[in-house]
Amino acid sequence: MTTAAEQREGTVGLGLADVPTTDDPQKAKDFTSDQEVRWCPGCGDYAVLAAVRGFLPDLGLRRENIVFVSGIGCSSRFPYYLDTYGMHSIHGRAPAIATGLATSRPDLSVWVVTGDGDALSIGGNHLIHALRRNVNLTILLFNNRIYGLTKGQYSPTSEVGKVTKSTPMGSVDHPFNPVSVALGAEATFVARALDSDRRSLTEVLRAAAEHRGTSLVEIFQDCPIFNDGTFDVLRKGDDAESRLIPVTHGEPIRFGPADEDGAGSYAVVRDGFGLAVAKTDDVAERDIVVHDATDHALAFVLSRLSDQDLNHTVTGVFRSVSRPTYDDAVRAQVDQARNDKPGDLQALLRGKDTWTV
């Protein structure tokens, strides 16, 4: 049997270092299953599915070495619609199942598809422990701020005051900020994208797939039936461009409608120990924050720029750093144990570490 180090030789990428590649050209249709896609008309899941199908061929991986694991919810139908291996698992437990797969099978590219209810309610502990362990997974968290499959109850990301079937007088819960939660759990890769922004979504997904460790991508996604238009302020209207703040590592954070020089009309600047938004004309170039995806504190403060009102919503990669992964460490221990003197099971069973109750 080969060791973990030997398995990595001759393969490509960082997050995909152990996964066998193929030289055969692939297209989106090669990753399209024969199952009829059954989401409501206008659902943002269609856009995410199209983006994933579109960029998977670029990874050059064999379809039999890709696995999508989902929990419960509308988003969790995802594995049915991809011609890869997949598993529709248990409510909230997809990260736990995916952890076992990633640890035991380094030759697999393991993905988790989950929703705001599935991941942040019953699955909250499984999510944060996968993130802190830094298992080699790519987690796509679809956030539509509502429970869609169970017909419109408020979710852990619904706004305060949200009127739903389960909160007829308005929700009194303060919602999670998924990016902040992930950063607080020490995730090594955290990003956010809009379902309707195909280019940015594809770039973020590719970066997440190439990252070695746990990657979490929050995807703002519309539910046209139970929470229609919840992210319209980021897509439509005169001020939509002034609300979205795309960030790129190593570049000054400017955004909004471009001026005559091509620069954004707004910028993110330091404000004491925090950050603020200012008009570009009112600040010096040196005061504009340059995004550093390796700066944990900066990533967290960026995640807090906007609250529930989406006034200043950051998209792109918040954090991307390298740290030893859980699955690599486990396999290294197995290799070491195999090379050491074999244990004596009978001696263990008959040892002194027993007692009578």
Image (cartoon, rainbow, N blue to C red):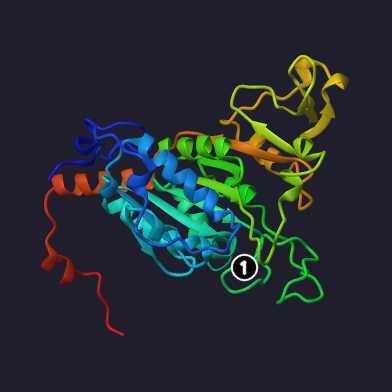
Residue closest to the eye, 316 or 333: 316
Where does residue 175 sit, x and y in percent of width and height? 70, 60
Judged left or right of residue 215, residue 159 is right
159 over 307 or under it: above or below: below
Q: Is residue 43 left or right of residue 230?
A: left
Instruction: In this rendered view, identify the residue nearer to me: 275 or 94.
Output: 94
Residue 276 appearing in the image: yes
Q: Which residue is mark 1?
A: 147
Q: Residue at x 75, y 35 (%)?
A: 241
**Which image quarter holds the C terminus?**
bottom left
Q: Is residue 345 above or below residue 204?
A: below
Residue drawn at (56%, 70%) of the image: 149
Nearer to us in this view, 144 or 131: 144
Q: Quadrant of the N terminus?
A: top left
Identity of the residue furthest to the bottom in this view: 357
Residue 214 visible in rendering: no
- The kind of residue tagged 1 is Tyr
**Residue 245: horizontal and vertical position, in percent?**
71, 35
Location of residue 50 in the rendering, given as x and y in whole percent from the top left corner? 48, 47
